[in-house]
Amino acid sequence: MTTLLHISASPRGRRSESLAIATTFLDELRATHPEVGVEHWDLWDGTLPEFGPNAAAAKMSVFAGADPEGDEAAAWRAAHETFKRFDSADFYLFTVPMWNASVPYVLKQLIDVISQPGMLFSFDPATGYTGLLENKRAAVIYTGAVYGPDRGPGYGSDFQQPYFEDWLHWAGVEDVRSITFRPNLATSDPEPGRRAAHALAADVARGFLSPAGPALLAG
C-alpha cells in the first residue's frame, strides 16, 4: 500500500493551527485518494532517541569506514531504526510551527538523528553530498503568529521554511508542496488567512498524487 507519514512537530494538540490545517489536508486526501494509507508520528511522544556523544562518535566511525562498537553501536542502531520508520513512507506531511524564527527543537532532533551517511545521504570528497531519498514527495504546513514576509524586521526573520526545505532537497526530496499560515495576531483578523490556508490544504491534498506541480504558498 502507498503510505503517507504525517510528522507533527506541534505540541499544542487541539489548539494547534498547523494540526488543524493538517486535519483538513488528511480529510481531503482520504476522501479523494482512499488507496493511500495514513500513519501519524507525533514527535513529542518520547520515541525519538537522543543524538549525543555515543551517536556522534558512531557517525564519525562510519565516516572513517569503521563499524561502531559497544555503546556507540547501540546508539547507531537506534538512529537506524528511526530512519527506517521515516524512510518506510512514500509521501510525507509535516506540520511545522515557527519557534524563535526557526523550527521546533524536536523536529531538529529528528533531522539530526536520521541525517546519517548511508541512510539519508552519501558523500564523495570530489563531488560532495547526494541525497538518498528517492521518489518521495512532501507537503509542509508552516504556521507562525508574528513573522510575515510583508512585515518589517521588528517582526522577525524566516529561518523556518528556507531551512526545512533546504534539508528536504538536500536529502533528495525535490517535490515539496508548501502551505503557510502566518497571521499577525497583534494587528489583524486571522480568519481570512486561516480560510485560505485550509482551502489550499484541501487543494494540495486533491492533487498530491500527481508528480508534477510548483511549490504552493499561502499566507
Image (spheres, helix red, strand yellow):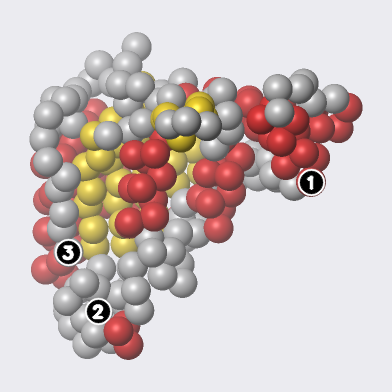
Q: Earlier in the sequence, mark 1 or mark 3?
A: 1
Which residue in the protein does label 3 denote? 219
**How many residues crowd around disc 2 within 10 Å: few (fewer than 14), some, or many (20 or more)?**
some
In this figure, which residue is indicated by the disc labeled 2?
A: 184
Q: Which mark is residue 19?
A: none
Element type at mark 3: loop
Looking at numbered disc 3 in the image, what kind of residue is underneath it?
Gly
Evaluate if marks 2 and 3 touch, with contact meaning CB atoms under 8 Å apart.
Answer: no
Horizontal and vertical percent position of residue 162: 33, 56
Could you tell me if residue 141 is visible in this image? Answer: yes
Sequence-wise, which precedes: disc 2 or disc 1?
Answer: 1
Image: 13 above or below 132: below
> In the displayed structure, would residue 217 be above or below residue 3?
below
Relative placement, left or right, of 21 versus 32 is: right
- Which quarter shows the C terminus? bottom left
Q: Secondary structure at mark 2?
A: loop
Q: Amino acid type of disc 1?
A: Pro
Q: Nearer the viewer, residue 58 or 150?
A: 58
The 10 Å Cα crowd at callout 3, few under 14, some 14 to 19, many 20 or more, is some
Q: Is residue 200 left or right of residue 94?
A: left
Instruction: State the image quarter where residue 174 is shown.
Output: top left
Q: Which residue is mark 1?
A: 53
Residue at the image point whose x is 50% and y is 28% from the top: 124
* Amino acid type at image mark 2: Asn
Q: In the rendered view, does 178 fall on the left or right side of 126?
A: left
Image: 117 above or below 107: above
